[in-house]
Structures are given as structure tokens and as C-alpha cells.
């Protein structure tokens, strides 16, 4: 039995990004087809070269774009870049995620993170993802 796109996204590593990207594409009346998305991004930003295969991986939640490309996609779709990669806090609370206690060091790091630009936050998130992936 072949999985639907929604099932593939739900079961993927980057499911939130894939689902959010798909919903933003639909909201902007853009067909969710890798070739047409790649062509649209490449024509909108002539300095980039996104391949349909790469877009397919994004849509299916297998990968996420690099931070520079993510910023371009967000601008193209007229959304805040952080909305493409991070769930609202209410979503975590509604999923009954484990609660955390933060010590002073954690609070200090979080304060510094919150003071960063969007591009810096994306870079930090990518570093954290890479480190956590290494420990799996």
C-alpha cells in the first residue's frame, strides 16, 4: 500500500517543516509539485539553483533547507522563517511533552538565544540538530 503525502510527512524526521511548507504553498496557491516549486524559487531568486529532487526531500520531510535557503523560501512565501521550523509553544504543551526545569545557566543561554537574529537562531538550531543526530 502506498503512503499518502500526509502519512509520509507525519512519519518523517522533519515532519513539522514538511507540513508547514506544504500548507504555506497551498495558502499561496502554489502546486505541491517539486519541479514547479523548484522552478518558481529559481525564477524568484535568480542567484539560487534549487533542484526538484531537493524540494521533494523537503516536502516529504526527509531534509530541511540550509539556513540561507530557508530564509529565501520564507521571504518567497511571505512567512516568518521561524514559523517554518518551530512549533508554537502551545503545541508542545498540548502534546504533553516532558516539562523542563531551567537553572541559571540554561536561562542565560536561552536569553542569549532569544536576542539573536532569525538567521543566527536558524544556525544554532541546525548545530543542535546535528549534535543530537550524532548521539542517536
Image: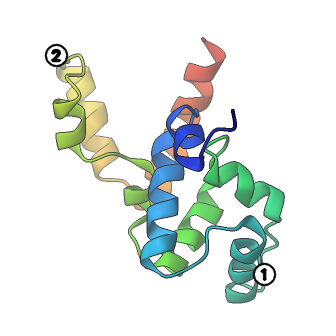
| Front residue of this view, candidates 125 and 110 | 125
Q: Is 26 situated above or below 126?
A: below
The answer to whether residue 73 is seen in the rendering is yes
Label of residue 101 in the image: 2
What's the residue at 67%, 40% (across, down)? 62
To which residue does mark 1 refer?
47
| Front residue of this view, candidates 29 and 69 | 29
Label of residue 118 in the image: none
| Front residue of this view, candidates 115 and 16 | 16
Task: Determine which quarter of the picture holds residue 67.
Answer: bottom right
From the viewer's perspective, is 74 left or right of 89? Answer: right
Q: Quadrant of the N terminus?
A: top right
Task: Determine which quarter of the picture holds residue 23.
Answer: bottom left
- Mark 2: few/some/many CA within 10 Å (<14, 14-19, 20+): few
From the viewer's perspective, is 32 left or right of 92? Answer: right
The CA span between labels 2 and 1 is: 45 Å
From the viewer's perspective, is 128 left or right of 82? Answer: right
Amino acid at each position: 500500500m502506498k503512503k499518502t503525502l500526509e502519512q509520509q510527512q507525519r512519519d518523517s524526521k522533519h515532519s513539522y517543516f514538511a507540513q508547514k511548507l506544504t500548507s504555506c504553498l497551498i495558502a499561496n496557491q502554489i502546486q505541491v509539485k517539486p519541479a514547479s516549486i523548484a522552478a518558481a524559487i529559481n525564477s524568484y531568486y535568480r542567484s539560487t539553483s534549487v533542484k526538484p529532487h531537493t524540494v521533494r526531500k523537503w516536502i516529504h520531510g526527509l531534509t530541511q533547507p540550509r539556513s540561507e535557503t530557508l530564509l529565501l523560501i520564507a521571504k518567497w512565501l511571505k512567512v516568518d522563517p521561524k514559523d517554518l521550523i518551530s512549533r508554537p509553544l502551545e503545541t508542545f504543551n498540548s502534546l504533553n511533552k516532558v516539562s523542563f526545569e531551567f537553572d541559571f545557566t540554561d536561562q542565560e543561554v536561552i536569553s542569549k538565544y532569544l536576542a539573536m537574529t532569525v538567521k543566527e537562531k536558524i544556525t544554532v538550531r541546525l548545530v543542535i540538530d546535528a549534535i543530537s543526530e550524532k548521539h542517536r
